[in-house]
Image: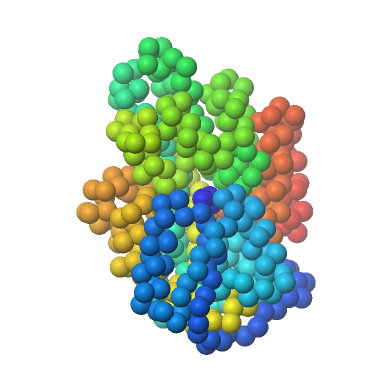
Amino acid sequence: MTTSLLPAAAAALSLALASAACGSSGESGPARNDGRGPITVATGKDLTRTVQRLVAAWNVDHPKERVRLVELPEDGDQARQQLVQNMRIRSDAYDVVRLDAVWTAEFAARRWILPLPDGLVDTSSFVPAALETGRYRGRLYAAPWLTGTGVLYYRGDLLAGAGVKDPPETWAELRDACAKVRRTPEGKGVDCYAGQYGKYEGLTVNYSEAVQSAGGEVFDSSGRPRVDTPQAKAGLRFLVDGFRNGTIPRKAITFKEEEGRRAFQEGRLVFHRNWAYVYALAAEKSGSKVAGRFGVAPIPGEGGPGSGTLGGNNLAVSAFSGHQATARDFVAHIVSPAVQKEYGRAQSFPLSLAALYGDPGMIKRYPYLPVLRQGMDRARPRPVVVRYNEVSTAVQEQVTAAVTGRKPADQASEDLQKALAALAD
């Protein structure tokens, strides 16, 4: 779920590292083919069972080219590892693969996925930033399907009861609002704020958002790491201080998306940073204690609205599929306007088509869409690099050391700067 927006910084680093990787990998995939027949789609966990319904409809219309879904592990790192192992042995077990937005460069550079033919999808219909996450060296390798950025869920009832009129735009306002809520009878025992802080990809996302929301950047426009600047250090200190002063509960040190979502739905958090998929689940009256009591806002920052990280999932065709023509047709079908709108009506994962964010029917169903689009306009990508997994691992190692108190925040920033510089060389 986790799961990027794409300005020059990511592009520059992608080119720098991709060229080195392509020259040294020694891997190549088979050529494109026009084979047709049954295909297997490796995707994420289908929490709302919506994808299964879309696949069932496809299978009725394509009895000789039926689709079988295989769900990858919920943990993004484990899902990537399963796909990588499959590709390394050139297995034809998967025909279509659902990739996190930051995996495109790696899979394309290693020739594990193939470029999509021009005209297969209407590129002008997508949110521009989402479309860029599917490109590698100017070619579209993966069709954008799900996109979005982190948003702030807040307990509107608790804020109103504490006399707080609006959700916070700054970290100071967030802390002040929590203090006021805790002084009310309804707010006693409710924790302030949590995001995703377990030692996995979500921590990289939350760290990147903190840095950006303090006016810093993880990499600059030339692809050089910048995590030792005053602004970047301020972002890390927001997380470190949050754990120290109780803004973030200690138990959140292991939170991934679902642990935080459950805490918010069970009424144990005033504020929660997560993806848009949480909206529909938190709004279910039968399974949520906060249904009808929460709202959604852009994430806060040090001096004003923060900058989120663009997340998302793209669909690509495996270079080792024997039925690539069917795989390409299925990708085009799933990201088409009619199917995306049908998918959007059934669940709250934000989709890649720009028109859906201004659709009155969609906004009525999911009032957070305008807020999400605002956040996407301010969001930035995680580095889109071939060696992204190593970059993310370095971030996780140093940020975990800082938030657990094993290393001073400034020292962790300086050590991370050295690690990222070595990866960029």
Determine whether 281 is above or below 52 in the image. above
Q: Residue at x 48, y 31 (%)?
A: 263
Residue 204 spot, x, y in % from top left: 61, 45
Determine whether 177 is above or below 45 in the image. above
Q: Residue at x 67, y 79 (%)?
A: 29
Determine whether 2 is above or below 258 in the image. below
Q: Quadrant of residue 83?
A: bottom right
Left or right: 329 in relation to 99: left
Left or right: 186 in relation to 73: left
The image's colour scheme reads rainbow
Residue 365 spot, x, y in % from top left: 26, 48
Q: Residue at x 67, y 58 (%)?
A: 81
* Observer able to see residue 200: yes
Determine whether 106 is above or below 284 in the image. below
Residue 34 spot, x, y in % from top left: 52, 87
Left or right: 180 in relation to 41: left
Q: Nearer the viewer, residue 125 or 155?
A: 155
Q: Quadrant of residue 118?
A: bottom left
- Which quadrant of the figure contains the C terminus? bottom right
Q: Residue at x 63, y 58 (%)?
A: 80
* Observer able to see residue 208: no
Q: Nearer the viewer, residue 232 or 42?
A: 42
How many numbered circles does the render carry? 0
Residue 387 spot, x, y in % from top left: 69, 60
Which residue is the extreme one toward the bottom?
34
Q: Nearer the viewer, residue 41 or 19?
A: 41
